[in-house]
C-alpha cells in the first residue's frame, strides 16, 4: 500500500508539471459516472470479481509445479494485459486494492467514495479463484506441493 501511494504521488508530481494539467480521474477506478463507459455498480462489481478470479487462476496455474518451468511470467503478463483490455472501459481496471487506493486520493472525483468496491471485488474474486483452483487440482497435486513442502 505504501508503494502504491508513493508511486501515485510521484506520477502526480510528474504529470502535474505539464501545461494545462488537470488531475481528472487520475487513473482511478469507478462505476456509474466514474466509469469510462458509464457502467453500473453491479456491472463493475461482477466484472472485477470475475476478472480477479481468472487472474488468480492464471497465477496459480502458471506457477504450479506441473506447469512448464519459466513460462509463468509470460502467462501472467499476457493474462493481465487481456484483463486490462477487457476492463479499462468498464472500471479502469483494478483487480488489486493497492492499485485502486494509491491513485484514488489524487483524483479530482468521488473515487475515494467508491473505493470500497475495489477492495471487496478483488477479495471476493481471489477467494472464488482459489476455490476454483483447489477444486480443479490434479489428483497428484496437493496444497502442500504448491507450497513446496512435499
Image: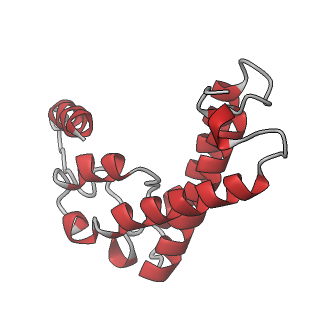
Q: Indicate the quadrant where residue 80 lies.
A: top right
- In the picture, the quarter occupied by the C terminus is top right
Depicted 140 relative to depicted 34: above or below: above
The answer to which of 140 and 133 lies nearer the viewer is 140
The colour style of the image is secondary structure
Q: Using residue 130 as the reference point, say whether residue 7 is left or right of it.
A: left
Residue most toward the top?
A: 70
Depicted 88 relative to depicted 70: above or below: below
The answer to which of 64 and 89 lies nearer the viewer is 64
Residue pictured at 59% horizontal, 32% vertical: 147
- In the picture, the quarter occupied by the N terminus is top left
Q: Is residue 86 visible?
A: no
What is the x, y in percent for residue 94?
43, 54
Q: Using residue 150 as the reference point, say whether residue 3 is left or right of it.
A: left
What is the x, y in percent for residue 68?
80, 24
Residue most toward the front?
A: 150
Q: Using residue 4 as the reference point, say whether residue 129 is left or right of it.
A: right
Residue pictured at 21% horizontal, 71% vertical: 113
Residue pictured at 68% horizontal, 59% vertical: 132
Q: Is residue 134 visible?
A: yes
The answer to which of 72 and 115 lies nearer the viewer is 72
Residue most toward the right?
A: 139
Q: Indicate the quadrant where residue 78 lies.
A: top right
Number of numbered discs overlaid on the protein picture = 0
What is the x, y in percent for residue 143?
65, 42
Residue pictured at 73% horizontal, 58% vertical: 135
What is the x, y in percent for residue 24?
24, 57
Amino acid at each position: 500500500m505504501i508503494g502504491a501511494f508513493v508511486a501515485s504521488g510521484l506520477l502526480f508530481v510528474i504529470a502535474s508539471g505539464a501545461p494545462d494539467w488537470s488531475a481528472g480521474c487520475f487513473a482511478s477506478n469507478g462505476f456509474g459516472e466514474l466509469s469510462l463507459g458509464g457502467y453500473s455498480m453491479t456491472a463493475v462489481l461482477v466484472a472485477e470479481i470475475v476478472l480477479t478470479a481468472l487472474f488468480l487462476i492464471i497465477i496459480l496455474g502458471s506457477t504450479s509445479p506441473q506447469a512448464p518451468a519459466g513460462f509463468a511470467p509470460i502467462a501472467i503478463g499476457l493474462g493481465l494485459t487481456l484483463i486490462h483490455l477487457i476492463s479499462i472501459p468498464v472500471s479502469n481496471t483494478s483487480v488489486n486494492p493497492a492499485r485502486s487506493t494509491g491513485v484514488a486520493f489524487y483524483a479530482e472525483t468521488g473515487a475515494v467514495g467508491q473505493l470500497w468496491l475495489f477492495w471487496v471485488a478483488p477479495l471476493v474474486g481471489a477467494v472464488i479463484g482459489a476455490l476454483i483452483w483447489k477444486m480443479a487440482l490434479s489428483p497428484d497435486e496437493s496444497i502442500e506441493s504448491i507450497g513446496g513442502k512435499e
